[in-house]
Amino acid sequence: MVSIKGALTGRLDSVGLPAQSRLMSVSDPIWPRPEAARSPDVMGRLLADGRTVVMGVLNITPDSFSDGGRFLDPEAAIAHGRRLVAEGADLLDVGAESTRPYGGAVRISHEEEWERLRPVLPAVVDLGVPVSIDTMKAAVAARALAIGAAVVNDVWGLQRDPDMARVIGEHGAAVIIMHNREAEDGTIDIMADIEAYFARSLEIAARAGIAREQIVLDPGIGFGKTQAQSITVIARLARLQGFGLPVLIGLSRKRFIASVVPSEPHQRLGGSIAANLLATLAGATFVRVHDVAETVQALRVMTAIRTAR
């Protein structure tokens, strides 16, 4: 397995900034066989060539903040997943319960969540790129992993469902540990809060036998944070490199963009790309996005310019 330390070291350029050493074309065979996208070394393979990993968002929900209801129909969801892969997504993040960061999300049972996923997930797994299951529930994670998902994206960072870490450890799966808070508090040092939260989550992961090579950290832009704090987190993202783990940034179409330039979610492409490019320069290894083609293009152009220096 390719070590995370080695993969991250390969991302540093001569002036100490993370570099996208190359961006592979969409047709390059990272996953020569569909089953390779489900293998235990998925995270190592994603990180192996040192480029930014693009995660496409597939929401099978009626109430997600950006595209709620658009892909609730199974055929529409599968078609959108296929489109994201064609546009260059390296992996897909599939969620069937809204985790919208601004409140108003409707909590559902694990049975209802699974009923939304059941007709979609097997077909998405067969698209040939790794699949991440975006869920807060260990029962849903276990069923998704059993049919081929390779990653669990837990927006409560193993600190909500007491069975989540055990399930991930038993399956040998990768995990995205996201920082979250029950409520905003504009008076706190948000970076210190994130660091303390991650330290607790990593202890939980270690006790459950989750290998560090299988862990990605997500500072949770918009979750339990004021708009100013979200901007601060992006600006100070390099602090998280102290953990020695890959960092995912999920800022696509988020409300902090509208705090700078008033806009609705579908009008925030420019702000999303600008913030994602800055985040990669600050050390983000993964970007979680709705607009895959545009993000891939932006990353490639940035890489071409930086490597021509």
Image (cartoon, grey):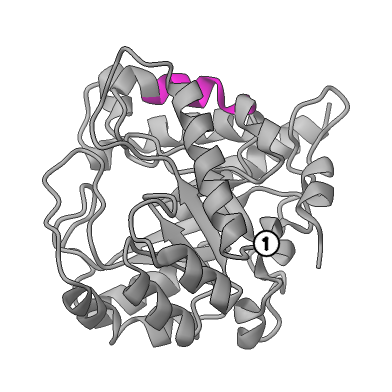
Q: Is residue 161 found inside the magenta-colored segment of the image?
A: no
- The one nearer the camera, 70 or 287, is 287
Image coords of residue 208 (percent x, y): 56, 64
Question: Above or below — where is 266 with respect to 165?
Answer: above
Residue at 42% x, 69% y: name it: 83
Q: Secondary structure at mark 1?
A: loop
Q: Quadrant of the C terminus?
A: top right
Image coords of residue 99 (percent x, y): 26, 52
Residue at 80% x, 57% y: name it: 3
Q: Is residue 235 found inside the magenta-colored segment of the image?
A: yes
- The one nearer the camera, 24 or 237, is 237
- The one nearer the camera, 250 or 245, is 245
Q: Which residue is mark 1?
A: 211
Residue at 49% x, 50% y: name it: 177
Image coords of residue 238 (percent x, y): 63, 26
Main structural element of the magenta stretch: helix, strand or loop?
helix
Q: Quadrant of the N terminus?
A: bottom right
Decide: few, some or many residues near mark 1? Use Cα within 10 Å; few <14, some 14-19, many ≥20: some
Q: What is the residue that sits farthest to the front in this orientation?
A: 207
Residue at 23% x, 63% y: name it: 97
Residue stretch rendered in magenta on the structure: 230-238
Q: Is residue 107 left or right of residue 188?
A: left
Q: Is residue 117 left or right of residue 309?
A: left
Amino acid carrying mark 1 in the image: Ala
- The one nearer the camera, 186 or 116, is 186
Whether residue 88 is visible: no
Q: What is the residue that sits farthest to the top in this orientation?
A: 187
Image coords of residue 28 (percent x, y): 72, 69
